């Protein structure tokens, strides 16, 4: 057997988990149904004649909670989705057939970390800070090979260090650091495949400003067909100093949904 | 940069999706909360001042619906889970801290297909047929390198061809083909990492017999610490004749749950 | 204090519950999200410092499961709801503001039982039997004062005796007895307030025919503004021989929904 | 026909709705699954051959959200529920069979309003104010006939005026006014049937103190078998000056649940 992939796999891998654990009470956007998990049946509730017992679960959640990917159907602008599809018409039937999350192919691709907090020498950028084109270019120079077409680019603001604090991570009064319109254009010009952030939205939010304007979503999802990955945990990745890696991301194949919880992995040969 | 994995990835991959699409109305076990997906907000419902609009989702489901993985916490026998953990005590608090699905590491491993339907020269084994040790051994001979420690072994009965029929796939009156106690012991002796099937449960079910006895669950989950993957789609994989491949499987990191929907991939260098 | 209502109440009441118990696994239409109830927290999971503990619940369900009321927004015909409201436009925003279940006032009104099974001297009418105008008129003669404007009229087919059987109650292959177009017209002419049945839909369903045509829904909900109450338990009411009673029905005040689970009561002075 | 109740009903009624509307985003305790309602199918999604269309709903919620009733199974103390039932044992199976909300009979009873805010001449008592026995006695004097055995007593703090403000209603930092242990004892001694409040919990909460101690729940639910009704809207009732009325409250008949959303009514002869 000479499958190059399997050989690499069997040579030993080092995996960094970029996903947040799904827990009741974790911070999430109030726009989306809250994550809940409960056990309808626990061991001890019902035991079969042979001594066996099965416990099980019930989950309810939005598709944009925890670490998640936005399908292109998530956002429209002036009534149109990516490719000029009529957004209102596309939703008739209750499923986004054309650009739903089921249309995102599983990703096993080159991933690149742009560590903007690291570039600035801080643990965390300030709330409301807009990551500039200069920031992106400087961070890309640190990545072996820079940012290329088809890559998945994850951008670290350090805001993920606030995840455990709950409300502070959502960031209403403080604002949230992130990419704005100019940075999104820079990413789109590089024809990347997907862009990710360690904030609840891939967007710079002004202090107290909320989600009134979402230019990065417009540029990337609507105008460029580039997927967004949100609420990533990029701390360990940055700690290891991995600028380049294999990114594995497999969305749930939910017919017609506008997003999916995901658990992206950064992987390297050990 | 000479990361062997990334080189293999960038050399080009061929991916076979082993997961079922999550759709309202798909066949699932009545023991688990039904999968539902709906769009609380569609494009056209609310448009921001700048012309932007975001659609979103609500999901409710059990963790053992669609293609899914069973955590070790899913099953106990005579009051004990794998490793002798007291099953009733472990559920106090409403989360399985010790053996919940959050404790399953993402898998990027050697995968092996044992195509029992192919071995028998049929599209689909009969309902109630018990896959024998002889079947497993014969099919393993067809796999390059056979079945080894740490592998993920997926076993095709052909029953997945009935998935689109709905109720027939669940299989109450007809029974379902699958591995019984002897086959499960054979797999456990090989110290595999996980075992999968194209049926709703990794288990041979007698016609009309339902889920009263689940010996393969006991042997694999409780006695051996081997994960189960259920409701796989193995048709394309068998059609391609891939006996060996890289198996990518990333469970959702749901704290304390007994399982997770998954979308496993079989991957080879193109 | 001489409030006539309170005096009657304090004189003693006899209450017959017309609602079904909400239980996981009860029969319901597959068109609607399944009823599930589970306990996220049980006693013993978490005890406060003072020895107190609180258990709680999670429910997921459609609004047309169990005994329930249909709001006028539930059904449209040729694109229009009751009063000529554009049905597609009314749903924009994800809530039926105009005719949603929140617009149904709580009912404390005269109720009338038309016991058609009793009239025919059978426990249960045949699947697919259409209750005729003659049936309704004959049964109304048995009710003191007949059927009057503003009444809530509940019609017993005896099909409720099948509720405990599960699938048989839903009635696909067998059909279901009920009121058809002519009977609905008769009820509408009497300007009743609401009409109820002991079947899963207020409708006669042909054997094997399913829900393709729903003429009683059209006549009553869309053309006449008369609410429908479904999956009633009318067995005890009929057993007591109450033709006339006070009907108490309080829908949940769910903003914008097309229906609500309800637990209607028939009440008389003891 | 001379049914006294129906005569009173047909003489004309005046109804005050004591329930809050169930809306996505309304204030609720973070301990309970959030209320969500969405429309899986809207008119226009699927039209039958005859021009008919049905829209429907999906709801997910805790049973202690919006205006709701606490079943006796909701709270235990030192491991015991009302009547000395072992609380942990009672939850095995995932349903509270003994004291679940299905065991609460629908209520059509004398209701009494104790308007403590009115007594103090304020719109709203201060956060953290404990309603005293003196307050209850003074308010009861204003009610015709006082507080009697079997009554449903609703106690107005005026805090319900904050419901529309959202977070302020929940009241963490401010505390919440309400009945404490002494007041609960006073109510229990009067052998009332149920007690209600216009706050999220029937309890005085200290500023910043949260729900660490819940003495009124212990005294009423655990020691006395008296149901609690929470998040009532008592503003219109107080505005009308109704001290005495017929209280109609019909819990959903959810097998094994610890509570139910309700929509209680205060009713009088017009």
Image (tube, coloured by chain):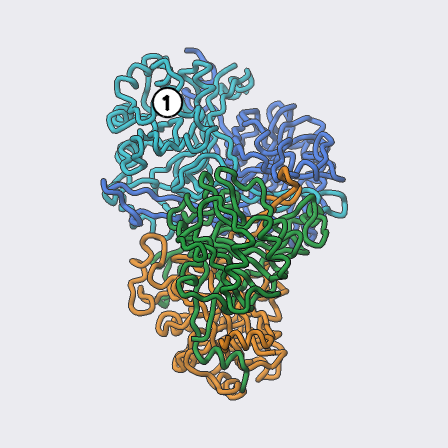
Chain colours: A orange, B green, C cyan, D blue
How many marks overall? 1
Residue that sits furthest to the top in the current view = D1
Residue named by callout 1: C157
Residue A33 visible to an observer of this rendering? no
Q: Quadrant of residue D146?
A: top right
Residue B152 visible to an observer of this rendering? yes
Chain of the residue where label 1 is placed in the rendered structure: C
- Please determine whether, in this image, residue C233 is positioned above or below residue B191: above
Residue at image location 74% in from the left, 39% down from the top: D79
Circle 1 Cα neighbour tier, 10 Å, few/some/many (<14 / 14–19 / ≥20): many
Residue D49: x and y in percent read 23, 42
Question: Along the line of sight, which residue is nearer the eye, C72 or D7?
Answer: C72
- Please determine whether, in this image, residue C94 is positioned above or below residue D6: below
Quarter of the image that includes the N terminus of chain C: top right
Question: Along the line of sight, which residue is nearer the eye, D149 or D60?
Answer: D60
Residue D203 shown left or right of residue D45 in the figure: right
Residue at image location 40% in from the left, 38% down from the top: C29
- Please determine whether, in this image, residue D29 is positioned above or below residue A270: above
Question: Along the line of sight, which residue is nearer the eye, B266 or D51?
Answer: B266
Residue A139: x and y in percent read 52, 85
Residue B64: x and y in percent read 53, 51
Q: Secondary structure at mark 1?
A: loop
Residue C20: x and y in percent read 48, 30
């Amino acid at each position: 057997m000479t499958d190059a992939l399997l050989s690499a796999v069997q040579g030993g891998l080092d995996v960094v988990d970029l996903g947040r654990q799904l827990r009741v009470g974790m911070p999430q956007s109030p726009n989306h149904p809250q994550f809940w998990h409960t056990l309808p049946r626990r061991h001890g509730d019902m035991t079969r004649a042979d001594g066996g017992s099965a416990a099980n679960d019930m989950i309810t959640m939005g598709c944009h909670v925890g670490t998640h990917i936005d399908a292109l159907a998530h956002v429209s602008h002036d009534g149109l989705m990516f490719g000029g599809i009529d957004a209102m018409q596309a939703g008739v039937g209750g499923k986004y057939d054309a650009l739903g999350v089921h249309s995102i192919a599983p990703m096993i691709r080159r991933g690149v970390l742009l560590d903007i907090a690291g570039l600035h020498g801080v643990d965390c950028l300030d709330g409301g800070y807009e990551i500039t084109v200069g920031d992106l270019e400087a961070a890309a120079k640190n990545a072996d090979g820079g940012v290329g077409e088809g890559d998945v680019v994850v951008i670290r603001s350090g805001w993920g260090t606030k995840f455990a604090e709950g409300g502070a991570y959502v960031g209403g009064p403080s604002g949230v650091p992130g990419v704005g319109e100019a940075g999104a254009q820079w990413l789109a010009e590089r024809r990347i495949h997907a862009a990710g952030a360690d904030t609840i939205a891939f967007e710079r939010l002004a202090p107290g400003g909320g989600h009134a304007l979402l230019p990065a979503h417009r540029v990337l999802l609507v105008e460029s067909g580039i997927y967004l990955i949100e609420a990533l945990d990029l701390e360990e990745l940055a700690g290891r100093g991995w600028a380049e890696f294999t990114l594995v991301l497999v969305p749930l194949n939910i017919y017609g949904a506008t997003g999916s919880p995901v658990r992206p992995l950064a992987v390297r040969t050990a």
